[in-house]
Image: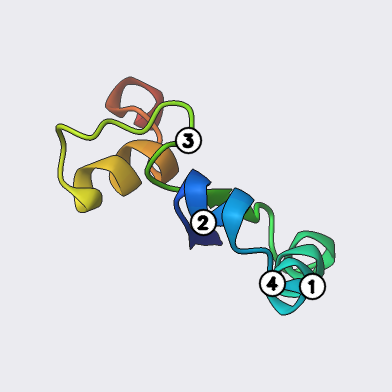
Amino acid sequence: MLFLLSYADYLERPNSVFYEIVDAARRHPGLEVADVWGPGWQDWDDSLPVSVNIARRVLPPRAAIG
């Protein structure tokens, strides 16, 4: 599960409910990955559309597929 959130929002708009949701997702036994990421985070590329950035984050590289 990917929570799409800019780094600036992560730092500047603390919301305890959001952090509780992320924490619950990270502890959920049915989820392998719970990640917070978006504009301003490491490896985000502002020159690419959001969809491409997300695909680069969540999809394995083609070489790893098979």
Query: Of tags 4 and 3, which is closer to the observer?
Result: 4
**What label sits on residue 9 in the rendered view?**
2
Mark 1 — residue?
Answer: 20
Report the front residue among 47 and 26.
47
Percent across and percent down for residue 25 are: 73, 68
| Number of the front mark, 4 or 1 | 4
Mark 3 = which residue? 41
Q: Position of residue 9 (x, y in %)?
A: 51, 56
Q: Is residue 34 above or below residue 49?
A: below
Alpha carbons under labels 4 and 2: distance apart: 10 Å
Quarter of the image that includes the C terminus:
top left
Q: Earlier in the sequence, mark 4 or mark 3?
A: 4
Taking the spot 36% from the left edge, 33% from the top edge, the residue there is: 44
Q: Amino acid at mark 4?
A: Asn
Eyeballing the image, is 36 above or below 24? above
Q: Is disc 4 in contact with disc 2, using a CB cutoff of under 8 Å? A: no
Count of labels in the image: 4
User: Which badge, 4 or 2, comes first in the chain's sequence?
Assistant: 2
